[in-house]
Amino acid sequence: MDDDILRMRGITKTFPGVIALEDVNLAVRRGEIHAICGENGAGKSTLMKVLSGVHPTGSYDGEITFDGQPVRFSGIRDSEHVGIVIIHQELALVPHLSIAENIFLGNELTGRGGLIDWNKANAEAARLLDEVGLQENAVTPVGQLGVGKQQLVEIAKALSKDVKLLILDEPTAALNDTDSAHLLGLLRTLKDRGITCIMISHKLNEIVSIADRTTVIRDGRTVETMDMSEPDAGQERIIRGMVGRDLESFYPDRESAAGEEVLRIEDWTVWHPTQDRKVVDGASLTVRAGEVVGIAGLMGAGRTELAMSVFGRSYGRNITGRVFVRGKEVRARTVAEAIDNGIAYATEDRKRYGLNLIDDIRRNISAAALGKLSKRGWVNGNEETKVAEESRRAMNIKAPTVMSVVGKLSGGNQQKVVLSKWLFTDPEVLILDEPTRGIDVGAKYEIYTIVNKLVAAGKAVLVISSELPELLGICDRIYTLSAGRITGEVPVGDATQEGLMALMTQDRELAG
Amino acid sequence: MTQTAPKADPSPEQAAPAAALHTGTSDIRTLLTRNLRQSGIYIAFVAIVALFAILTGGTSLSPINITNIVLQYSYILVLAIGMVIVIIAGHIDLSVGSVVALTGAVSAVLVIQQGLPWWVGVLAALAVGLVVGAWHGFWVAYVGIPAFIVTLAGMLLFRGLTLRVLDNISLSPFTPEYQVVASGFLNGLLGGDGFDAFTLLIGAIAVAGYAVSGFRTRLARITYMQPVESFPLFVARVVLVGAVVMAFAWQLAHARGLPVVLIILAALVLAYGVVTRRTVFGRQVYAIGGNLSAAQLSGVRVRTVNFWIFVNMGLLSAVAGIIYSSRSNGAQPAAGNMFELDAIAAAFIGGAAVTGGVGTVVGAMVGGLIMAVMSNGMQLMGVDQSIQSVVKGLVLLLAVAFDIYNKRRGGTAR
Ligand SMILES: Nc1ncnc2c1ncn2[C@@H]1O[C@H](COP(=O)(O)OP(=O)(O)OP(=O)(O)O)[C@@H](O)[C@H]1O
Ligand SMILES: [Mg+2]
């Protein structure tokens, strides 16, 4: 009994038209790292929002016991009061404020007369940063840090609140391997200090390596809680629970059949929009019909910048170089021209750059190709709905109707809406920037299948990804990018993670 | 996942009635909850109309008074049409009051001082409106200065130009032809005993048009297997709207007939309602307001769209300027003072969001009418100016608070 720090019993939560959780049970032992797995839209984030009071008592059915006491939270402050802290899927830091200011936001250390004691705050922040292993000055604005470091600031913020149960919703989704490893190491340290952790993740290998127990949720119901020390506990069993069947492989098979050249980029150079430096430096690459080509690179190597500058010059300045689509030079100065010339770019940050979150699925899907649905400026709304409905079915987007607001979909389903939008423009070249970030294994497989269908139809696909196994699994060829330069081009048959990594870091070593 | 989407495969002839009868239809409750934000406004409007009808012992609904409301507030409603589009795109326009004054002044100088025909004044005013709009559009769209700043500057700038154009004096009166715009009536075209049959006919045509277009939309949705409201509900809606429109026409017919401005206003509301909902331009306005970066990366020509939004606002300000100068039968240096605030308030009461991406022309019209009925009712009751201002301020605040409350309820809790 006392072993369990948390028990959630019979949790049912509905939204208009959606049953997000149905009779879910969750028990978390004191001091363990408890992973929660499930497909996109299974209800993981919702369950954690119920637990942390984001969805207050009364908006759901069921009971929660924490530390032996029944609890009813009417807001996030209540849950923090008893020591439950949640770090949301979307980070909630204020970019212009310093690390220390962010850590103590809403929880300010006041001295005499109710004024904030900045010396104390900064000193305390420095101590917390040390604890999470972040070597940064506490007065640095958070906006200047990368995602990995921001994640650590979030944890430091949680620690400042005297946390007993720390909830992390997909903490490593946006992190590269090094940052992820650091974060997981930190979680182990916290565990040693007796802090209980609940972690949601789609990266099953991480879960296997770090979790003590794992609860699998499918379609708003608990499937099982497994002890990771059991011999048969592992990725296969988790996947079976998540998708309800075995997944034979992570990557669908494809016959590679490269045809004529579809995209050619020559000597592409892009300058940083405000600073005086090159972000992409003389990059050249080609993608042929029926081919999936990957771009591997570390964070800051210029992958996204390369793609966005090719996509109608939506990034950078002083852009030089040439782009050809099917042998014809494309001088696209705007996104609209790039789309007209058959280029599509699905962004890595769907919430900020990919979707109109307050609008419905239908209008998001049609947004980039309204011309196809309109005559002389008049939109055929019914045709639009039909098209959206077809995409919803083809992409298996989980939502009651295409009139559902995109902002309320789960992350993976939002990603499918982004893909639907770009597929509807019927591009020659589709550039996918981190297409499977925050997406469950089943949906990943679906997305790879869609990519395969696309190349089978003679299109070209360029994939940017931080996950090397993914690139190795789906690409025909991989370019490596380091500090804005292409440092290698490897056919997938010859590529290994180590080999790619060496190329991805090459330029730095030459320079340094 | 409780709701099921209409099935895919059955042939259209079979699927249509099935969809209409079962999964596809929605009852009053879902209709109300789905459109709670919008229906909230209508309910508030009806309540306010009823409240003032009681408080004024029915005077507020008398033929003469209804006609007066139309004449008195039409130019605010015209401004609100442009303003809601500006607000949906995430901007604001503080200059419209000054532009109303300037366009009216230009027109007055030409028609009253120079003795040119009425239409020269009208065309000149429209041209000035377009130029002013292009000016704002240029700074907002191509230079990238926030609209708040650009139009704040415009407010001062165009007020100053108005004083210049008028040489600091009022001009009056306009020729009778010019006055027709705001004070003219179509009356007696078809005769009628003690009332105007023509007005009733126009009202009837409007109701018929509403019914037919509603029915066609419904049929189209059924062919595309979209959910529609149940047939009795559809009929009830048409009957209700028809009754209100006919009652309104009846009252007008018993006063002075069909006001010319009402025709102008109705045409504008219809046109802009369709533009915002059905055209690519309208879509792009919502897309820009909803998420600027996403719109940009979806190929929306953000600058061009922003530019035309302001040109359009300038044009509508000129229309309002013409109506106002015609109604006040002249041009005054202080004309149009604070109109921008009424127009902005109308848009927000009508459900537009400060953050952009949300709002409708019809909503803004209802918002404007709520303000109009309130001011008019309080004037009838002889309420002090100071109290009127306090009440209007509170209504704006409460309307937006109600809106936010609704959104929150629809958002996280059930
Ligand atoms: N505020 C809301 N309003 C309406 N529906 C919602 C809301 N929040 C979540 N949902 C719905 O509840 C279901 C569960 O969503 P949730 O975000 O919990 O999924 P998830 O398991 O975290 O998925 P992901 O792995 O993609 O993040 C989804 O179908 C989603 O559309
Ligand atoms: Mg989630």
Image: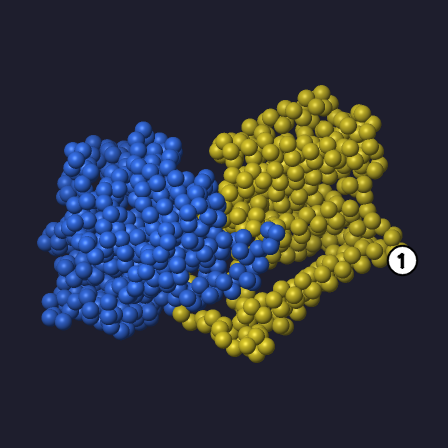
Give the answer, above or below, for where B374 lies relative to A408.
above
Q: Colour of chain B?
A: yellow
What is the crowding at mark 1: few (fewer than 14 residues within 10 Å), some, or many (at least 20)?
A: few
In the shown orientation, is residue B124 left or right of residue A213?
right
The x, y position of residue B18, in whole percent, is 55, 77
The x, y position of residue A507, in whole percent, is 20, 38
Give the answer, above or below, for where A9 lies relative to B201.
below
Q: How many labels, in total?
A: 1
Q: How is the image coloured?
A: by chain
Give the answer, above or below, for where B223 lies relative to B270.
below
Considering the image in quadrants, where does the N terminus of chain B appear?
A: bottom left
Q: Is residue A252 visible?
A: yes
Residue depicted at x 21% and y 57%: A493
Quadrant in which residue A418 is drawn: bottom left
Location of mark 1 (residue): B193
Quadrant in which residue A408 is drawn: bottom left
In the picture, which chain is blue?
A
Give the answer, above or below, for where A159 lies relative to A246.
above
Q: Is residue A24 visible?
A: no
The x, y position of residue A499, in whole percent, is 16, 49
Tag 1: residue type? Asp
Q: Secondary structure at mark 1?
A: loop
Considering the image in quadrants, where does the C terminus of chain B appear?
A: bottom left
The x, y position of residue B358, in whole percent, is 52, 50
Residue depicted at x 48% and y 45%: A336
Q: Chain of mark 1?
A: B
Residue depicted at x 66% and y 34%: B129
